[in-house]
Image (tube, rainbow, N blue to C red):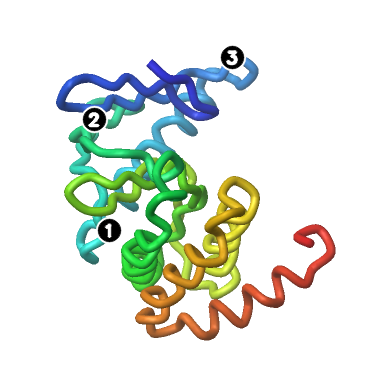
Amino acid sequence: MKQGAEAQVTIKEKQVIKKRAPKNYRNSSIDERIREERTEQELKNIQRARKHNVNVPETEKKSSYTLTQKRINGDVLKGIISKKPGILSKVGSNIARLHSADVIHGDLTTSNIIQGDKIYLIDFGLSYISERIEDKSMDIHLLKKTLQTSHPSVSENAWNNFLEEYRGYEESEKVLERLEEVESRGRYK
């Protein structure tokens, strides 16, 4: 079992169970509503991504606060990227499809990408729907920063591989222009 900020994750042989735990510091009725809404939002965003051919785990809602997903057998990108920076091209094509569906992942790091039989995006707990170019640029800004800070020896090569395929997204140039603007802001330097 793993404890995240939003949920407890139990990994079994064939499935992953994600249960949003109560937050004792919140009013109980407000807490229930928040946990239920976030669980429903996560499921809808995963389903929307799936409809746009983004590789995500098969997911079902089992209760108001619990999602059950098919377990993806493979390696977390964080552990293999130093040997396979070219794999970011497959990530780029998935994010291009995700952004075409106006889904913002919200936590796009190498810890939330798995290489199994194909590349999968996981953990949509912070995801939301947005058409805003700013939101899409912030999504990939986090990925770029993760590459630079956690994988500096391959970050430039990996980022270029990502861009190669991400540019297949219709609005990618607008997103990348905004990314430059985001990076020029003081707190992101």
Q: Depth-wise, is mark 1 or mark 3 nearer the camera?
A: 1
Q: What residue did someone put label 2 on?
A: 68
Residue plotted at (79% across, 62% down): 189
Q: Quadrant of the N terminus?
A: top left
Which of the two labelled residues, at mark 1 and mark 3, occupies the earlier sequence position?
A: 3
Q: What residue did someone put label 3 on?
A: 24
- What's the amino acid at mark 2? Thr
Residue plotted at (34% across, 50% down): 121
Image-based side of 49 in relation to 38, left or right: left
Give neighbour class at mark 2: few <14, some 14-19, many 20+ (Cα, 10 Å). Answer: many
Q: Nearer the viewer, residue 48 or 98?
A: 98
Give neighbour class at mark 1: few <14, some 14-19, many 20+ (Cα, 10 Å). Answer: some
Q: What residue did someone put label 1 on?
A: 48
Q: Identify whether 179 is placed above or below 32.
A: below
Q: Nearer the viewer, residue 179 or 161?
A: 161
Q: Quadrant of residue 123?
A: top left
SS class, disc 3: loop
Q: Position of residue 56 (x, y in %)?
A: 26, 49
Q: Position of residue 128 (x, y in %)?
A: 45, 54
Q: CA distance from mark 2 to mark 1?
A: 17 Å
Q: CA distance from mark 2 to mark 3?
A: 24 Å
Which of the two labelled residues, at mark 2 and mark 3, occupies the earlier sequence position?
A: 3
- What's the amino acid at mark 3? Asn
Residue plotted at (51% across, 52% down): 106
